[in-house]
Amino acid sequence: MHHPLFSRRSAGLSALALILAAGTVAPAHAETAISADRCEANKAAGKITFLTSFAYAATLGILDVVAAKERGLFDDLCLDVAIEPGSTNSQLVSANTAQIAGVGSASDVMVAIDNGADIVGVATYGNVGAIELLTMADSGIEELKDFEGKTVGYKGAIAPQFSAMMLDNGVDMGKINWVSVGYDPTILPNGNVQGLGAYKSNEPKVLEAKGNSVKEWDPDAYGVHSTFNAMIANKQWAAKNPTAIEDFLRAEFKAFDWINESDANLDEALSYAEKLSTSGYDVKQSKVRWQTELALMQGSLPEGMMPGQQSDAQWQPEADMLVRFNLVKAAPDIETAQDNTYIDAIYADGALVWPAP
């Protein structure tokens, strides 16, 4: 997928020509990047802390934000943005300790709101699930019922998508030994677990790169549909600073388009994330991760919608799933759980609007 992009280099050369002609010094933020009034409004929003959903992983909604920061796109829009690895993102954004953050899916947004969080979903990247279960290809597990009696690792909490997939196919969840595990996928080929919760873009690629043959159990293939990589904002802060949240998303998706323009751009973006990482960074595997997630996003983008745009219909399957498994106290009100005015404002006529109006 390719969208028309505003050429920052061309804009810079045009601005330079004007400066030379006028014999004056360039302003800190060129008028072609943002209007003076909008610049002041964005400055008034103060420091914006963005929390990543998982360190500096090469995932949609992290790498593009990092690239926007490194390439000065936030500066171009008079935004003061700090990027930090996240943890309890919904709680921190609700408390306005951070203003914007990434979370795993629409489910995370709706569950947090059900628990009283003052947050709102402002963008959704993927409209297909990004998680699945893995088994070794020679494990003898040939159907979902075969998971009974086996030990299966999960991260954080058992995903409702896994529960739905199992229960819809007559599996007794009580007969599966679910255990909380870390992020080392080699526990699967090493035999510590017989099944492993995984991200489609990560663990299966890592294990296959090490010569392991795995079988993937995708909830989507069993009719369990969900989303991946949602962006949240503090609801009150966003309402008070609409141009700041719009332009954060504008810079983010400008960088997203830039990354996807060429392999060289992706490599450069990965170098930014590698520089920020303090625990080692597998550039080769990270590149595969981005490309895999990009394909998932592109393949699930509803007709007529642009990257990041969301709707009630996209979140409804997950809302229904949360109600079905009693993971929320009340049926989610999707209309208030997401605010689409910000993401919709950055697009016009099928293209990202850059510079800002």
Image (cartoon, rainbow, N blue to C red):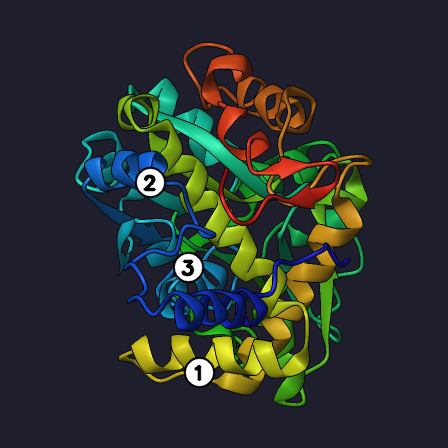
* Residue 185 screen position, x and y as percent: 50, 73
Which residue is painted at 48% across and 53% down in the image? 252
* Foreground of the two, 46 or 201: 46
Total tally of numbered discs in the picture: 3
Disc 3 from disc 1: Cα separation: 17 Å
Q: Amino acid at mark 3?
A: Leu
Would you place residue 118 above or below residue 32 in this image?
A: above
Residue holding disc 2: 36
Which residue is painted at 55% across and 82% down in the image? 267
Residue holding disc 3: 73
Circle 2 packing at 10 Å, graded few (<14), some (14-19), many (20+), is: few
Q: Is residue 285 left or right of residue 28?
A: right
Image depth: mark 2 or mark 1 in front: 2
Would residue 181 be visible to someone looking at this image? Answer: yes
* Residue 83 screen position, x and y as percent: 28, 58
Image depth: mark 3 or mark 1 in front: 3
Secondary structure of residue under mark 2:
helix
* Residue 240 screen position, x and y as percent: 28, 22
Mark 2 or mark 1, which has the lower sequence index? 2
Circle 3 packing at 10 Å, graded few (<14), some (14-19), many (20+), is: many
Q: Amino acid at mark 1?
A: Ser
Disc 2 from disc 1: Cα separation: 33 Å
Would residue 87 be visible to someone looking at this image? Answer: no
Farthest-out residue, front = 22
Circle 1 packing at 10 Å, graded few (<14), some (14-19), many (20+), is: some
Mark 3 or mark 1, which has the lower sequence index? 3
Disc 2 from disc 3: Cα separation: 16 Å
Secondary structure of residue under mark 3:
helix
Kindly check if marks 2 and 1 are in contact, taking CB atoms under 8 A apart as contact: no
Residue holding disc 1: 271
Q: Amino acid at mark 2?
A: Ala
